[in-house]
Image: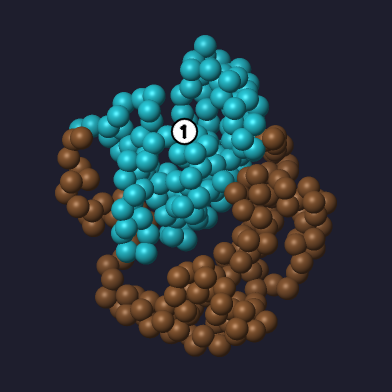
Chain colours: A cyan, B brown
Amino acid sequence: MKIKLTSLMVDDQARALAFYTDVLGFTKKHNLPVGEHRWITVVSPDGHADVELSLEPNVNPAAKTFQAAMLAQGIPLAAFEVGDLAAEHARLTARGVAFTRAPTAMGPVVIAIFADTCGNLIQLYQPT
Amino acid sequence: MGVLIEAGELQRLCRASALLRDDAASAATIAEVARAVRMSPFHFTRRFAAVFGTTPHQARIAARLERAQAMLARGASVTEVCFASGWASLGSFSGLFTRRIGEPPSSYRRRAMVQVAWAPPFAGCLGAMAYLPASSFREA
């Protein structure tokens, strides 16, 4: 059993693909039509080439409720590891990304949290 | 430049997002929505866009269009949908719908009613992979 695919619900797949590639720097792997929606996956150029993140259309009312509640409570729904959090925070801030937590030391990591413009908060973390 | 959103402000922005979505047909101005969550209109629009990737006005329009699509799929008439969704005229509704969705509301309605009847349930879950070509899963 391999962890090759993980997923995030997004409230706009086109905006999500643009944000996750143009702003975050992931690479599009798949972008295929499925009914009214699309199967979109991205991979990290810095990570394992066969580990994919799927950006799922958030059409289920229960999922929308969950996503909105997590956002309002400031709870991130995914976390990505970075080598230099200060540099990433500066780069993303210059790109206009909204952070809900500036880089903060927390035990063995430094973390920061930002909004992905598609309904989710995302945590960045750097092991110290 | 990016922004830092404090917890209280995030909650106010989320409340505004819910207002714009749940009361999409409302005639309240964006300035009134901003005041309802105790933010200045300029500050509100900028911070909302930074978090949600779209302006409050566009978020409301997107919510209206989603509601319109759902009503059309259930068989409501284009006229009924137009006025229930908060548009002032059939012309402005049809024009915007066609530009954003890619087809006129009448033709979307015909197609969507048929799809609701026979399409397998798909709620944006990982089950979508059943509809992909086999090549998607082969090692590169």
* Left/right of residue A87 with respect to residue A77 in the rendered view: right
Q: In which quarter of the image is residue B28?
A: bottom right
Secondary structure, mark 1, is: loop
Q: Is residue A112 above or below residue A8?
A: above
Residue in the picture at 60% in, 85% down? B90
Picture quadrant where residue B108 is located:
bottom left
Above or below: residue B40 compared with residue B139: below
Question: Where residue A77 appears, x then y in whole percent?
Answer: 49, 39
| Quarter of the figure that contains the N terminus of chain B | top right
Name the residue at 45% across, 46% down.
A17
Q: Position of residue A127 (x, y in %)?
A: 49, 15
Query: Which residue appears at 27% of the width and 67% of the height?
Result: B120
Q: What residue type is labelled 1?
A: Gly
Residue at image mark 1: A25
Count of all numbered marks drawn on residues in the image: 1
Name the outermost residue toward the top: A128
In this orientation, which residue lies closer to the viewer: A60 or A50? A50
Image-based side of B21 in relation to A123, left or right: right
* Image coords of residue B53 (percent x, y): 60, 49
